[in-house]
Amino acid sequence: MAIIGVIACAAGGVEQLCDELVTPLVNAGHDVPVTLTPTAFSWLSANGEADRIEALTGFPVRGASRLPWEPRTHPAQLDVIIVAPATFNSTAKIALGLADNQALTVVTESLTTVPVVLFPLINAAHAEHPAWASHMAALRAAGVHLIEGPDLWPLHPPRQMPPDQRLPWRAIVEAGLRAHDTPGSAERFPLDEGRRPGTASPGA
């Protein structure tokens, strides 16, 4: 059994987090504490998904830093971290070492000591940003397991992704499990045949 921390950002598809990512990891026998960016926390609190995650995992879903005198509610040490979906904004912050919320603090503190799987949910315009290539290079150099590339997540212009496409959840789950078994090597993980990437509008 491993402790697999899940970090999720406010992007389309995050509402599927409990069913598509947390449940398979729990069913595989792992502890799965979940931390959300503030906007993602507000989304999943509003639609009841945060409550479902808490009932399934036994951990409170975190969306903010605890007060100094409050007890820890998540394990202090994680075996693997999965960041999915990761928005353009949060991916850039992780690459730059910026930790302005609890979710990013968890990732940046563990980036070089714990296997990290990251799925950047971006569009074609994001990929053309002058800083994007250097962000990806920084994450690879840190050993992050990136789930990206045209075979995994074909890029479309903003607001032009087919509405019936879904995030590659199965590939994300499998990457997280493999990262626990074979830590320390950054790579791109192939998507299972028949799985189609999803669509979303990145948020905070």
Image (tube, rainbow, N blue to C red):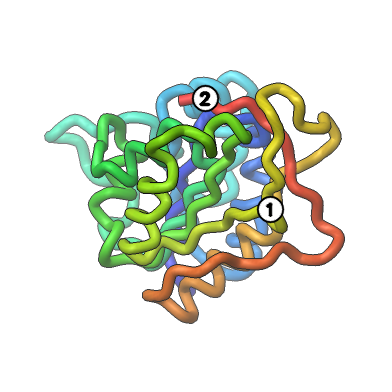
Dot in front, 1 or 2: 1
Residue shown at 27% from the left, 66% from the top: 113
Q: Amino acid at mark 2?
A: Gly
Q: Residue 150 — which label? A: 1
Q: Quadrant of residue 96?
A: top left
Q: Is residue 152 left or right of residue 182?
A: right
Which SS class for mark 2?
loop
Amino acid, disc 1 = Pro
Crowd tier of the residue under label 1, counting other residues whose Cα lies within 10 Å: few below 14, some 14–19, many 20 or above = few
Is there any visible trace of residue 177 in the rendered image?
yes
**Dot 2 alpha-carbon crowd within 10 angstroms: few under 14, some 14 to 19, many 20 or more:** some
Q: Earlier in the sequence, mark 1 or mark 2?
A: 1
Residue 34, x across and y down, in percent: 46, 45
Residue 203: which disc?
Answer: 2
The quarter of the picture where residue 43 lies is top right
- Could you say whether the residue bearing mark 1 is in a helix, strand or loop? loop
- Residue sitting at 50 percent across and 21 percent down? 42
Does residue 131 sit above or below 203 in this rendering? below
